[in-house]
Image (tube, rainbow, N blue to C red):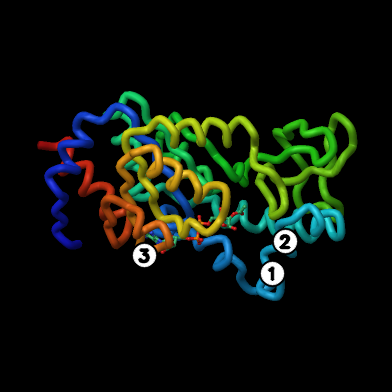
Amino acid sequence: MRNLTFPHELVSLLKRTSKLAALTGAGVSQESGLRTFRDAQDGLWKQYKPEDLASPEAFARDPKLIWDWYAWRREAVKGVRPNPGHYALVEIEKRIPEFILITQNVDGLHRMAGNKNVLELHGNIQRVRCSDCDTFAETWDEGNEEVPKCEECGGLLRPDVVWFGETLPRNQLEASVEAARICDVFFSIGTSGVVQPASSLAHAAHNQGAVVVEINAEQTTLTPKTDYFFQGKSGEILPELVKAVWDH
Ligand code: OAD
């Protein structure tokens, strides 16, 4: 691993900052062995476009196909563990009085690592709800010929994730916008920032005067607007940053 040094002004800002918002994307889970949404399609699923597997229209057209795709992804997530980048974010939460973690990931790894104040903007692949009445299902019968049905109303069950063309959960979105509006420091980590409205959060934070820090394997469209950009793996850079700021 590289020996990282961080600018003194950033270290001293993080030591005294009280409001920090962090936005994460698929890159944060990459070192846990999870491939990004588009890369996740393997073997049998390769023939489909993401929109053909993750939209309300696709579910209406062929609910069993979509159910099976998510059952397959749920299996892929099972046994996957958080990586040092996730754990570094837990350490940051312990040290910053008002810390909020906004994630586009549906894998639940931030909570598994131990973060408490997490907004899951795109839902969670482990949760299942009724496509008609929205009641959450705790258990369901997998491996059936049919898509499992809601015990309350008989509607078809679906994953509690945001599909293409669907709106984001209102409370989570409002809380995210508010966090970007009031934070002193905004982290954008492992996200390409191409999907709205999550990507506009970093710009909102920048426009209200927050210091924007980006950690990514590559430059993104946000990079020119950042105050600090660290290129590399979040699982390496975040633990080093925690060490530099708080372990001295
Ligand atoms: P993307 O797949 O668009 O971007 C992943 C980003 O992570 C890229 O910018 C990579 O350079 C970066 N990256 C990869 N490995 C990394 C590592 N080890 N450390 C740091 N950065 C790394 O994923 P998202 O930005 O999360 O939406 O995509 C956002 C949304 O687009 C997803 O939530 C999904 C998709 O359509 C829905 O499903 C609604």
Q: Residue at x 35, y 63 (%)?
A: 217
Using the image, tell me which numbered label, if any, was put on residue 49. 1
Mark number for residue 223?
Answer: none
Please state the horizontal and vertical placement of residue 4, each as a whole percent of the image.
Answer: 16, 56
**Residue that extends furthest to the left in the rendered view of this protein:** 248
**Residue 242, quarter of the rendered image:** top left
> Where does the image place residue 219, in percent across and percent down from the top left?
36, 65
Task: Pick the residue in front: 140 or 185.
Answer: 185
Which residue is tagged 2?
Answer: 53
Quadrant including the N terminus: bottom left
Amino acid type of the residue that numbered disc 1 sits on in the rendered structure = Lys
Q: Which mark is residue 219?
A: 3
Front-most of 9 and 234?
Answer: 9
Q: Secondary structure at mark 1?
A: loop
Name which of mark 3 and mark 2 comes first in the sequence: 2
Q: CA distance from mark 1 to mark 2?
A: 7 Å
Q: Are marks 3 and 2 in contact (CB under 8 Å)?
A: no
Residue 19, quarter of the rendered image: top left
Which mark is in front, 1 or 3? 3
What residue is shown at x 71% (from left), y 47% (from top)? Answer: 166
Q: Amino acid at mark 3?
A: Gln
Within-10-Å neighbours for mark 3: few <14, some 14–19, many 20+: some
| Left or right, 15 with reference to 66 | left
